[in-house]
Amino acid sequence: MPQQIDPLVERLGSSMWKVHRRIASQMSLHKEMGLTVPQFGLLRLISQEQKARVVQLADKLEVKSSAVTVMLDRLELLGLIAREPDENDRRAVIVSITPKGQKLLEEAQYRTLLLLSEHLAVLKPEELQNLADYLLMLEKQERLF
């Protein structure tokens, strides 16, 4: 017989899913640019890595290199990334974000934080601090206090 799930856990799971869906549905910049959510995530990863090999990107995204290559084709077509051969390995390609890609990413991150601020405005400052502490605890899977 399966283990009983606490109804509070079910309620939390449902609420977290609903809040995530509501916020995610309002984040439209990637749609305005003709990007999918995975392509947008890849652009963010490229920015963080600065100069990354396709294989590294695929590993971090936990997908095949061929899937990353298809997404990179679209990002390159839009002028958001650049590809160049790896000087140390002729078989490898180095990917970097272009100034246009960086500008788009910064705008998207600003819009995302602005939207998140609007959703979090229903919380009092101490509630917001508690939420931040609890989410960090869940993220790290350890008690903070």
Image (cartoon, grey):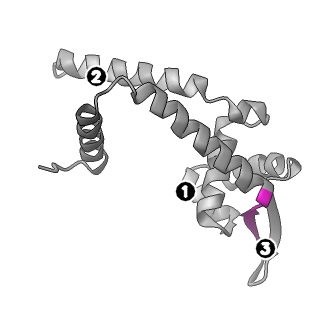
Badge 1 element: helix
Q: Can residue 66 be seen in this view?
A: no
Q: Where residue 72 sits: x, y (%)? A: 77, 52
Earlier in the chain: of badge 2 and badge 3, it is 2
Disc 2 and disc 3 in contact, CB within 8 angstroms: no
What distance separates the C-alpha of mark 1 from that of mark 2?
Answer: 29 Å
Q: Nearer the viewer, residue 120 or 82?
A: 120
Numbered mark located on residue 60 in the image: 1
Q: Can residue 37 be seen in this view?
A: yes
Q: Which of 145 and 93 is in front in this view?
A: 145
Please give the name of the residue rendered at 19% of the width and 15% of the height, measured from the top-left corner.
7
Around disc 3, counting alpha carbons within 10 Å, would you say few (fewer than 14), some (14 to 19), or many (20 or more)? few
Numbered mark located on residue 12 in the image: 2
The residue under label 2 is which amino acid type?
A: Leu
Q: Where residue 43 sits: x, y (%)? A: 68, 51
Question: Badge 3 is on which residue?
Answer: 91
Q: Is 40 above or below relative to 66?
A: above
The magenta region covers: 91-99
Camera-near label (2 vs 3) is 2
Please give the name of the residue rendered at 28% of the width and 29% of the height, measured from the top-left corner.
124
What distance separates the C-alpha of mark 2 from that of mark 3?
Answer: 48 Å
